[in-house]
Image (cartoon, rainbow, N blue to C red):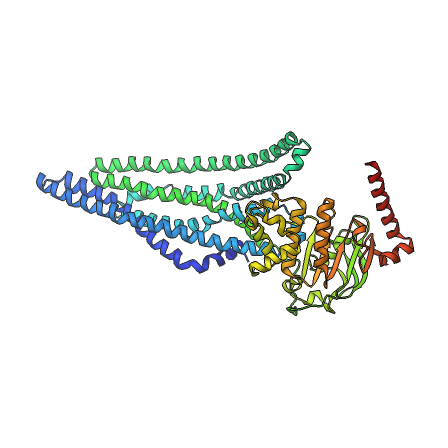
Amino acid sequence: MTSFKLYFKFVKPYWKLVLITILIGMVKFAIPLTLPLIMKYIIDDLLLSTISIAEKTQKLIEVMIFAFVLFVIIRAPIEYLRQYFAQLTTSRILYDLRNQLYAHIQKLSLRYYQNHRTGEIISRMINDAEQTKSIVETGLMNVWLDLFTLTIAIAFMIHMDFGLTMVAIAVFPLYAFSVKTLYKKLRNLTKSRSQALAEMQGYLHEKVNGIPVIKSFTLEDYEKENFGFRNNKFLNRALALTKWNAITNSIINTITDTAPLLVLAYGGYQVIHGNLTIGAFVAFYAYLDRLYSPLRRLVNSSTELTQASASLDRVIELMNEPYDIVDSPQAKIVHKIKGKIDFQDVSFRYDNTSDWVLNKIQLTIQPGETIAFVGMSGGGKSSLISLLPRFYDIQQGNILLDDLNVKDMTIKSLRSHIGMVLQDNILFSGTVRENILLGNPNAVEEEMISAAKAANAHDFIVNLPKGYETEIGERGMKLSGGQKQRVAIARVFLKNPSILVLDEATSALDLESEHLIQESLSKLAKNRTTLIVAHRLSTITHADQIVVIENGEIKEIGTHDQLMKEAGAYFRLFNVQNLNSVEQLQSF
């Protein structure tokens, strides 16, 4: 399906509004076409006529009353309605388009977001989507109205003088040739400019989020230079587009200005030889503006539509991005699970060209068990737990939940049973209440407060300036690390999942915050299947099973006591951490 065909799916529900706008526009554009006729009547039938002054005055008053009614009383509401319906239609279409895009990007896998900058995605949804308005406003409305104006103007001109009309439109073929030749390059230049803008926005979005790092490393001058490079790239592409537009406009305007000179020459000749009245000549010349104004707008429409088409390509490219993770045709909605998990010979890599991140993982977890995954960074721990909610799909093996393959569950129902607490939990701008309610938007006040208390978050929340109504800023920047983590845990308490996943949930916190969070996590893990990725081994000695993963393979599995007795990889990791802790204490 072409970009335009896909786009017109959004236009189709509003075809009646488009039609109404065009009909109102025809009336709006028809009214000014009467002005040259009024001028001809006043000059030929009044000013140059032999009737009495009193009769001339009476007829002048009558025609001016008619003109004022037409141009002031009738045209004003017509102008308003035309503008209103045009903007209403394009705004509605843009609303639907952005809603569809937002729904689409939420279904894209994490792999897509790892390979694309956030700012570039936003640029396509905001800037490029906005540019597509011209396809409707210009392409479906203004173009037809300008063609209507051209047709009526030419009809009136032919009625007045056929030969003079042929002279007036003699330059039309030059317009067609210019549009075909000059606008061929414009689409690529526009697309190139949009891409440079998206890259700059992507860079800017990333650096604004990382401003604390820039300041801490005093990288302001360095980043200014880097941004200047991208800004200059955008400037060069924008100037290339501007240069081509300037060339186009100069050629088009030169062609346009040739027509009046030809009309003046031939029309003046006809008046001198008595073949054309002065009134008709003046009216005809007035129609030139009615002829070439819409023609010039049509040429400018080519520019707008070319630019809009380039932006539409980028929007549709995003909309056509395929989903990596989808429900299978036989996927079932699972309403309740016990929490048994089976990894059966699971092998996984992020793409077909990379090495295996996990290799033949074989592991069974019973309902209610707490399983800890430990090992050196990069061993595959976080990758393993990300496979359970199907953030990625495995290439080999099976993952079963209560003996049902996770691929045979709907994604929504699968993830509804899994609660995740990460090292860097994302909070959204808004209030504390809104962030906790993300766990269950339909929860009542008592449930929300109960979840906050269970997460050891209620006490600090009520001491905030506005309590639960306190705005926490983007990514929760107004809260400390421990406070953000407790709000995130409250969110999971409110969700009340059957399976809990903790990925380095306390590794970046101070001891006091860690104690409070460990306490709340213990409550949260009770009677749930719990998967823990841990850096501090002292926090997972209570686990039912500890799984040591190295280089994507399970090297050891057992309880803390069993693994310590084996004196293997876990034993070495645990002792190294304890030794480091002792040395740190002695240094004080």
Q: Is residue 335 left or right of residue 280?
A: right
Where in the figure is residue 233, as x and y percent of width and height? 59, 35
* Towards the viewer: 561 or 115: 561
Q: Quadrant of residue 445?
A: bottom right
On screen, 523 above or below 175? below
Residue at 41% from the left image edge and 52% from the top image edge: 88
Of the 4 image quadrants, the one containing the C terminus is top right
Query: Residue 368's quadrant in the figure?
Result: bottom right
In the rendered image, which quarter contains the N terminus?
Answer: bottom right
Comparing 199 with 316, the one in front is 199
| Image: 348 above or below 467 | below
Residue 323 located left or right of residue 87? right
Residue 136 on image: x %, y %: 44, 52
Residue 381: x and y in percent read 77, 53
Foreground of the two, 510 or 441: 510
Horizontal side of 157 relative to 482 (left or right) equals left
Task: Locate residue 60, reporting x and y percent.
Answer: 15, 42
Residue sitting at the far right: 566
Q: Is residue 386 visible?
A: no
